[in-house]
Amino acid sequence: MRSLFKAFGLEYERIAAVDGSTLSDDTIKGLVRLSPGMAPPTPAQVGCFLSHRMAWERVANGDRDYGLILEDDAIFARNFRSVVANRKLFRGSPDIIRLEGWPDVVLTSGGSKRIGHGYRLHNLTWDTYGTCGYLVSRRAAKALLKMAEHYTSPIDHMLFTASSDIYQTLDIKALVPAACYQYLWYHGEAEGPLASTIPSLAHSTSESPPPPKLEKEKEPLSVKIFKELKRTRIKVTRLANGQRWKSIDLHPIGPLNLTVHLSDI
């Protein structure tokens, strides 16, 4: 990360992250406030939450209008420096600007604004995950410290999913295409210092056989026609509103690649 920042000419402050494995059960219990039915977090998830809170404190107590928060496994598009320094990005004073991509396909919002350097700024109207790179305003950082006093869900769910109070309260934008990407998702694997300490919960460990498929009753022709007309109407409406299904990939200009030896870290 030091080599990447040096290549971009970016000043930075390294914040020592919270190691979740060092947190006591009582500390975690005092921090966590879960809705009924939610699975308890891992210590690593709580540590990640606290690490981002420390970054928000730096922004809230600083003298800059915005702070750039980056996790230590981010990779950057080669024009990253240009876009984060672009004044057009901050027009309207959004609270949070998501810079990170996500490999799953999402329905992007219409009414986006051209930023330059091949980017557009969208209202974040879709659920997405990851917190490896985002800008947060000083005003929003102060609000986040109050709104996220306790752990209620993983940090990326708090910020970037529609069920979150933060998502519904703050003005959150997203850069398309992405200006940064988490190393794991971009390369498909990560080892050594770049490997996550937060276990993936995406895949079930159950070995139970799948339930048998039930035969569907044939629908009347009139029902099929009605459904097809409804799908067509939705597609036309989305097209007219400028909405598109797409994955938020790293900018086509490609990543800034530097050869970094682990012995230098």
Image: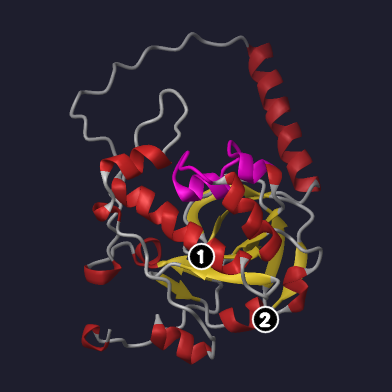
Question: Where is 28 relative to 95, above or below?
Answer: above
Q: Under tag 2, what secondary structure? A: loop
83 to the left or right of 72? right
196 to the left or right of 68? left
Residue type (three-letter) at the residue carrying disc 2: Ala
Q: Of the two numbered discs 1 and 2 on the same chain, state the one appearing first in sequence.
A: 1
Tag shown at residue 55: 1
Determine the image quadrant of residue 112. Answer: bottom right
Of badges 1 and 2, the one in the foreground is 1
Disc 2 designates what residue? 85
Q: Position of residue 59 (x, y in %)?
A: 60, 68
* Crowd class of label 2 (few under 14; some 14 to 19; many from 20; radius 10 Å): few
Whether the residues at callouts 1 and 2 have beta carbons within 8 Å, the answer is: no
Q: Under tag 1, what secondary structure? A: helix
Q: Is residue 68 visible?
A: yes
Q: Which span is picked out in magenta? A: 149-168
